[in-house]
Structure formats: C-alpha cells, structure tokens
Image: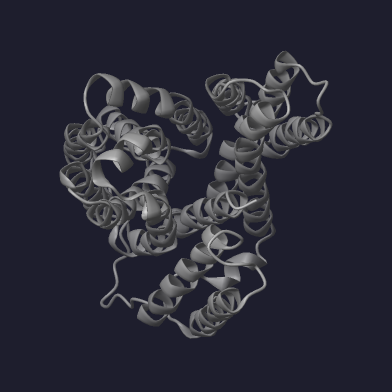
Amino acid sequence: MQMEKKAVNTKLVLTGLIIGMFFSSLEQTIVGTAMPTIIGQLNGFTIFAWVTTAYLIASTTVVPIVGKLSDLYGRRSLYLLGTIIFTIGSFLCATATSMEQLIIYRGLQGIGGGMIMPLSQTIIGDIFSAEQRAKWQGVFGALFGLSSVIGPFLGGLIVDHISWHWIFLINVPTGLLSAILIYVGLKHEAIRKTEKVNIDYLGIFTLIPGIVLLLLGLTFGGDKFEWVSLESLLIFGSTIVFIALFIIFERRAVEPILDLSLFKNRVFSTTNILGFLLGLGMFGAIMFVPLFMQGVLGVSPTKAGSTMTPMMIGMILSSIIGGRLLLKFRFRTVLTFGMAFATLGFFLMSMMDGSTTIFTAYSFMAILGIGMGLVMPTLMIAVQNEFPKSQLGSVTAASTFFRSIGERWASRF
C-alpha cells in the first residue's frame, strides 16, 4: 500500500463538507412540507409517495458501493461526482412538469445524496487523527440533527413566500460551492496503487436489486399489499435470493463490495447492530410521537410536529458535547452513557398515555435526543478508529448503510 501525500486545506475541505452534508441531509425532510402544494400543481396524488421513496431507496442503495469504490479510487473524485449528480438532480426536480418526472429526478438526486453522506464522514476520518475525529464527527452529527429540525420549517417558508421549485433550486449554488471547495481544498488522497483494480461487478449487480426489493417491501408492505400475500412473498423471496447470491459472490471476490470478514471484528459487528437498532428506534419515535400527540392528547398538527424539536435540540447539543467527551474518556464510556439515556428515553415514551402532558412528552423526547446524540457519532468514531485508512470508505459506508436500513424499517411501523 502506498499513499499519495499532498497538501490539504483543512478549512476549505471542512467548509465544503459542512455545506454538502447539511443540504443533502436537509433534502430528506424539507420536501414533506411542500408535498400538498406539489401535488396540487402536478396532479399526482396517487403516486406522490414515490417522491420520497425514490430518494430514500436510491440514497440507501448507493452507500455501500460508493464506500468501497472510494477505497479503490479515492474520496475526492467520487465526492465531486456525487455533488454534481445531486446538483443536477436538484435542478431537474425544480423543472419537473409532472409527478412522474419529479420521481425520476428525485431518484437521481438520491444517488448523489447517498454518495455525499458517507464520503463526508470518510473524508473526516482521512484528514484528521483519531483524537480530532471525535470533535468533528460530533459536529457533523449535530448538523444532521439541525437539518431535521429546520427542514420542515424551511420548506414551509419557501413554499409560502417563494415557490416549491426553490426547495430544489437552493441546492444548485450550494452544491457547486461545495464541489469547488472540495476540489481546491482536498489534495491529499489515500489511493491504492495496484496494477489492476478489481471491481466486484457481480456483487454490485446482486446487491442493488436485493436492497431495492427489500426497501420496496418495507415501504409498501401493509399499505399497497398485505404482509401475508403473493406480492409480499415475491418481493421478500426475491430479496432473499439476491442477498444469498450477493453473499456467495462476496466470499469469492478479490475486492468485495462488503468484505464479509469484517463481521469477524467485534467492534464492526457491534456498532452496526447498534446503529441499526438506534435508527429503528429513532425513526420509530419520529413516526409515533406526532400521531400520539394528535390522536391521544388532541393537540393541533402544528404543535404535534414541534414535538420533534426537543429531541433534535438534545441530539445537537449532545453530539457536540459527546465529541468533546471522547477526548477525555474511552468511547465505551461515552457509548454506555448514551445508551443509558436512549434506553431511558424509550422506556419513558412507552409509559405515555392519555394523562401525559405536552411538557412531559417534550421532556421524554429531549432525553431520547441526548442519548442519540451521544451514541451516533461515537459509533462512527469507534468503527473508524478500529480500521486502517485503506478501509475507511467501506466501514464508514457500512455503518451508514445499516443505520439507514433501520430507519427505513421504522418508517413502516
């Protein structure tokens, strides 16, 4: 293994990553507020759910593939490609004249967004030492929480005062700025020098349909078709077949998309399991609590939507503080405290009933957010510190991927 060493302008790189990651994560929440207006103008009520589904499926599917490719070809070129795809997809979304067009363009936008998210965290792992990663991964965890808080508000503001098209157009100048900053600032690449790069095409061509079918089943199961039905059997049965083929091919591949031997590492296996469970729990809470607030406590939709704010504020603050704590304590200590807060938050939420006050619900959500903010960045730091930089793309993408699968699963329950 040889490393190509060049200067890195850390300030430019960080600024570019912050802009790119913030706006790509913002895209997951900002569109929901604008959907009634978009549906009214594009006349696509029967298929409007695909506007969100296309983005989520595309962004989740591309994650493990881009992680491995970044280990082979370097982060810079793939990050720039992802940013360009995201920017073009955003521009096309703003020009859509039908719901079908918007869905296709959202899928393209999702591919770019799915490349930006894991590569941002991988680049942080590349350019900083193990100690410095703790600080910056905490900041990026806070950015994710911040985008979740202001996304719906910003979407409503843009729709009310400008036009829904600007929900997508806003990504064009920010995407170009992010790409320019990364292009200029990131000169250091950890590229593997080999005479021939072996791309795992069989792994790619079995993983993509396996993930797509799984996410389609989780998204529409119990809605478009019954869980116990012929459609369900075909979708999930095909998922099992493709995943089984993927595993077979990965065991034989020279450069597997997902090296199965990584699961022999206790830190890798544990962090991915915890990431999946926390993604499942967090998005389960996001789906459940607003319904509980409206259906049981009888609050308005606006007030019910604000229930997420205490959780995200807790998550933002604890992500930043957790990064600082990791400079003084072992990651297991911070992770234990975070899991304790998250477990307490989930337990308290399970005790809510008709006598629960709004303030109490807010308090429970804040406790859960504190736990999430401590755990999420810590899991990423733990897995990055366990492996050499030559594998950072793969392990970082795997961590993002398993958490995303948990989030998508939670959205159906």
- Residue at left offset 58%, top offset 78%: 240
Query: Going by the image, does 371 lie left or right of 156?
Result: right
Query: Going by the image, does 212 lie left or right of 240?
Result: left
Q: Is residue 87 above or below residue 345?
A: below
Residue 359 in sight: yes
321 and 60: which is toward the camera: 60
Rendering quarter of residue 47: bottom left
Q: Position of residue 30 (x, y in %)?
A: 38, 33
Q: Position of residue 26 (x, y in %)?
A: 38, 34
Q: Position of residue 350 (x, y in %)?
A: 80, 35
Q: Quadrant of the N terminus?
A: bottom left
Q: How many numbered circles does the render carry?
A: 0
- Scheme by which the image is coloured: one colour
191 and 259: which is toward the camera: 259
Rendering quarter of residue 147: top left
Residue 329 in sight: no
For this orientation, the residue located farthest to the top is 359
Q: Position of residue 294 (x, y in %)?
A: 64, 28
123 and 288: which is toward the camera: 288
Rendering quarter of residue 327: top right
Q: Is residue 375 above or below residue 247?
A: above
- Residue at left offset 22%, top offset 53%: 81
10 and 100: which is toward the camera: 100
Q: Is residue 95 above or below residue 149?
A: below
